[in-house]
Image: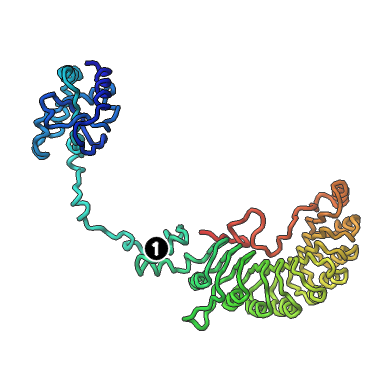
Amino acid sequence: MEPSKVKERYQAWKHQGPTRSLARCDSTDLFPQMVPQNQLNIHSHICPKAPEVLFDDRSTYFNGVDDDQYQQPMSARAPSASLSRQLSSTSLNQSMNRISSSENGPLRIRFRPLDLSVIAPMKENRARSYNSITNMKHKDYINLLSDELILSIFKYLPRASLAAMSQTCRRLRSLTHDPILWCRVDMSRKHVESCYLRDVLLRGTVVLKMYQTTIHGSSIYSPNRNTWFTKLQFLDLTLATISPECLLSLMSVCRSLRKLSLETLPLSLAIFEKLASNAQLDTLNLTMCTGIDLDCCSILTGQMKHLRYLNLGWTQLSDQCVHFICRTMQASIEQLTLSGFRQGMTDECVENLTRRAVRLRVLDLSDSSLLTDKSVASVLRNCLHLEHIAFSRCYAIAPIAYASLKQSRHLTSLDIFGVVDDRGLQKLHSLLGSSIALNQQRFSYVARPTYGLRRTSIWGLRTRP
């Protein structure tokens, strides 16, 4: 009988359905075999779930297998080599003869379970029993490594993996708390409990970035320690959400800060008093901070003697505070931003400021509406090391006054956004020469931890391992 007719008879018997209930069969684990008419009392009708692929033009599906062999136990069956020879010796014509012998009666197909280990066994030298694998004594290879090697591996793990490793055993817990693994931590854009922040600081963190981080809690004081200080030297709290109490407790445990960013945070006199305890503080970013009064300004200019980079842009200082800062500014200042004081910054303030801060290299006085040509002359006369200056949106200064800055030896860039149009910029550029670039920095970068595309570092230091 042709395979097409076999398929037709199979479809006919499939629609008729089985004569009794059938056990569930899986086509991937079963081996099909043709059943003669006289053995119907042993086997059931065609399984309705039999796959259509059984009737493809493949000789292996119709190769006969000796029934007597499968009636024997598994251990008494023929080895794989003899079985393979038996399967290969049966040709497709013999299989077709068996099918043709059953033309008068219904077509029956029997499914038998197939032991794959008999047909395709593993090599004797590679075979392993399940019991030998499970009963094999396991070796703890991690404990065979030295602490230095484990720490060198842990450097490449994220903080979440380190926290999971610390819960395995005491040795790994002590190694995961090593200060070398927590020297640089980046918790940007996360919600952090104050107790977790305390645990991180106790592990010896030196560089900590918390950009847009929300800190829950009112204190980071340790209940088991009366007095403790962190090793923090670089701290970025730009755009962070933290309560004034928690910020005060954080500043209370810091004595080694060198660079600090508190942009947009509310400040108080107590916080400035704690900041003054950091004798090595040289960079301070207070952009858009609130709560700075005259007493805070006195601490800023009187006790922080080593400040070199200071940003006070858009801090909403009163006119009295602006005048006080310009009169008492430290001589160590090299980069300063005093932008956004539309009515507070005057020509007299610029004169007092440039006389005291003789080391100024970068000065930003943008958005100061009361400044005139006298301020440009004061800067040119007193700031001999000036490299960059910004007078953006200072509309009271005549554009021709900027041409006098050509006499400055070290000046390389001038920002005057919003003052002149493109045609005026071209004319001014011809007057200043090619050594002075115009309108290169739209926003101030003084004392800011990140600027431009450097998002994974603060002040040039990487915060991720």
In the image: residue 255, left or right of residue 88: right
Q: Name the residue at 61% across, 74% down.
A: 247
Taking depth in this image into account, of 105 and 309 the one nearest to the observer is 105
The residue located at (25%, 27%) in the rendering is 16
In this rendering, the answer to whether 197 lies above or below 114 is below
Instruction: Look at the numbered disc 1 and give the secondary structure of its residue.
Output: helix
Looking at the rendered structure, the number of numbered marks drawn on it comes to 1
Which is nearer the eye, 100 or 333? 100
Quadrant for residue 113, please give it.
top left
Q: In this view, does 463 lie to the left or right of 389?
A: left
**Residue 24 x %, y %:** 23, 39
Judging by the rendered image, the residue that carries numbered circle 1 is 165
Name the colour scheme: rainbow
- Counting from the top left corner in percent of width and height, residue 90 is at 16, 22
Question: Can I make out residue 184 in this image?
Answer: yes
Residue 456 in which image quadrant? bottom right
Is 44 or 129 nearer to us in this picture?
Answer: 44
- Return the residue found at the far bottom: 226
Q: How many C-alpha atoms fall within 10 Å of the one at disc 1: few (<14), some, or many (≥20)? A: some
Residue 1, horizontal then vertical, whole percent: 21, 16
Give residue 39's position: percent from left, percent from top.
11, 28
Q: What residue type is labelled 1?
A: Met
Q: In which quarter of the image is residue 270?
A: bottom right
The reply to whether residue 255 is in sight is no
Indicate left or right for 253 with 318 as reference.
left
Q: Is residue 99 above or below residue 172?
A: above
- Residue 213 higher or lower than 123, as above or below: below
The front one of 301 and 241 is 241
